[in-house]
Each structure stands twice: as structure tokens, then as C-alpha cells.
Image: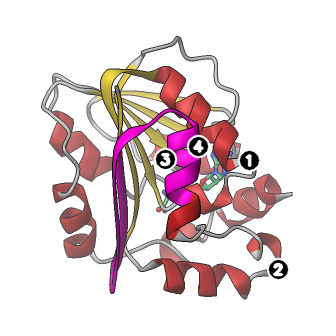
Amino acid sequence: MTTSYFNGKADVWDEQVAEKDPARLQRMADNLDIQPGSTVLDVGTGTGVFVPFLLRKITPQGKLVCLDYAERMIEKARSKRFEGQIDYVCSDIHTTDFRAGAFDAVVCYSSFPHFQDKLKAFKEMRRILKKGGKLFICHTSSRAVINGIHQNIPEVSHDLIPEKDEMLSLLSSAGFKNIELRDEVSSYFVRADRT
Ligand SMILES: C[S@@+](CC[C@H](N)C(=O)[O-])C[C@H]1O[C@@H](n2cnc3c(N)ncnc32)[C@H](O)[C@@H]1O
């Protein structure tokens, strides 16, 4: 079960696994079309690696909800005492308790491959986005690099980013529009609108 894998990694995540280059994280954050004052959901927050970058975008007037289904991960994030309007929620993105239209943006930084039912997760993320809200899926490595890393770890070997046509089809089936997908040498980025 992937939850136990991530719980087991919580203590060593920052040192052994997380992206450490702030310039790469900042470049990724720069790609996100998120306005000051927005209410944003960070799906698969983990230990909070991307949280400071999201907080800078939303400014103190915005609100960030950090969600992760691994309680030890979310506790690590909470223990960092980030400053801002932040809620920490231990939940699975496939079935959340958020009200419909709660968020201006939903961000999956380095978490999407792990969602076991990708269409269901997309539908849930669309449900909780406002009309005009945006979904972002991002990684600071290409699809090939991410998939290659996962294939070599037994616990997550099936947690892969689908190929482009499948991604576009899943997003369209979930009702997203204006889909942009860029798989580059050192990043993977998807943006889609909830119209
Ligand atoms: C690869 S880690 C990335 C964590 C963090 N975003 C980072 O970059 O360091 C993926 C995170 O997503 C969480 N996750 C995976 N599937 C999830 C799901 N269905 N619902 C909520 N969280 C999930 C895991 O517990 C883990 O903390």
C-alpha cells in the first residue's frame, strides 16, 4: 500500500528524495498562473517542499490547503510552521470532503503519478474547483525521468505518468478544457481549465 510507503519515508524525505534546488522549484512556481489572494489546494503536499513557493504566489491574503493521505508526511509539513493561512488535511484526493467549487487552483506537484484511479481523481479535482479555476500537474523532471525512477522502486513501480494522448483523454473525460501539456527535458507541466 503506497500510504505506508510514504509514511515510512516521511523522516528521510527532505534529505533523500525531495527536490532540493530552489531555482527549479521557483521556475516551476513561475509557470503557475495563480493570482494573489487565491485559495489553492496543494495535493500530495508531502513534507511541504512546494509550500513556500505557493505561499509566495497567493500572498498573505490567499489561503493554502495542504492535503496528503499519509499522516506522517502531513505532520512533517505542519511541523515546519509555515507562515500564512494554511489548513492541513489528511485525506485521499479521490474522495475529499471539500465543497464543490472551493478552490481557485488545484496543484499536484510531484504527486499525480501516485493517484491510483486517475480519472476519478481528475473528476474530484474538477468538482472542487471553481468555475474558471485551474488544475496544474507539475514535476521538475521529464515524464521519462519520473517514470524511470518509479519503475525502479517496487512500492511505486506502477505509479506512472501516462503518455500524452492518454493524459489528454483522461482530462477531457473529466470535463477539463483548454489543456496545455509540456513534457520537457527538465520539467513536466499540465494546465487545464475548469470551465
Ligand atoms: C512523491 S511525494 C511528493 C511530495 C511533495 N509534493 C514533494 O514534492 O516532496 C507524493 C505525495 O503524494 C501523496 N499522495 C499520493 N497519493 C495520494 C492520494 N491519493 N491522495 C493524497 N495524497 C496522495 C503521498 O503520500 C506523498 O506524500
Q: Which residue matches tag 4?
A: 75
Q: Nearer the viewer, mark 1 or mark 3?
A: 1
Amino acid carrying label 3: it is Ala
Going from the N terminus, do you reach mark 1 or mark 3 first? 3
- Amino acid identity at mark 1: Asp
CA–CA distance in space, label 2 to label 1: 19 Å
> Alpha carbon of mark 1 to alpha carbon of mark 3: how far?
25 Å
* Rendered location of residue 183, percent (x, y): 37, 74
Distance from Cα at disc 2 to Cα at disc 3? 25 Å
**N-terminal-most mark, 4 or 2:** 4
Mark 4 → mark 2, Cα distance in angstroms: 25 Å
Give the residue displayed 56% in from the left and 56% down from the top: 112
Camera-nearest label, 2 or 1: 1
SS category of the residue bearing label 2: helix
Eyeballing the image, is 104 above or below 10?
Answer: above
Q: Is residue 189 above or below residue 178?
A: below
Q: Which mark is residue 117?
A: 1
Residue of label 3 = 77
Of circles 2 and 3, the one toward us is 2
First in sequence: mark 2 vs mark 1: 1
Q: Position of residue 28 (x, y in %)?
A: 25, 63
Most distant residue in the top direction: 99
Using the numbered discs, state the Cα–Cα distance from disc 3 to disc 4 in whole angstroms.
Answer: 5 Å
Q: 194 or 7, which is in the foreground?
A: 194
- Residue 2 located left or right of residue 106: right
Q: Residues within 10 Å of mark 3 (few under 14, many from 20)?
A: many
Label 4 near label 3: C-beta < 8 Å?
yes
Q: Which residues are magenta?
A: 167-192
Task: Please state which amino acid type lies under the numbered disc 2.
Answer: Pro
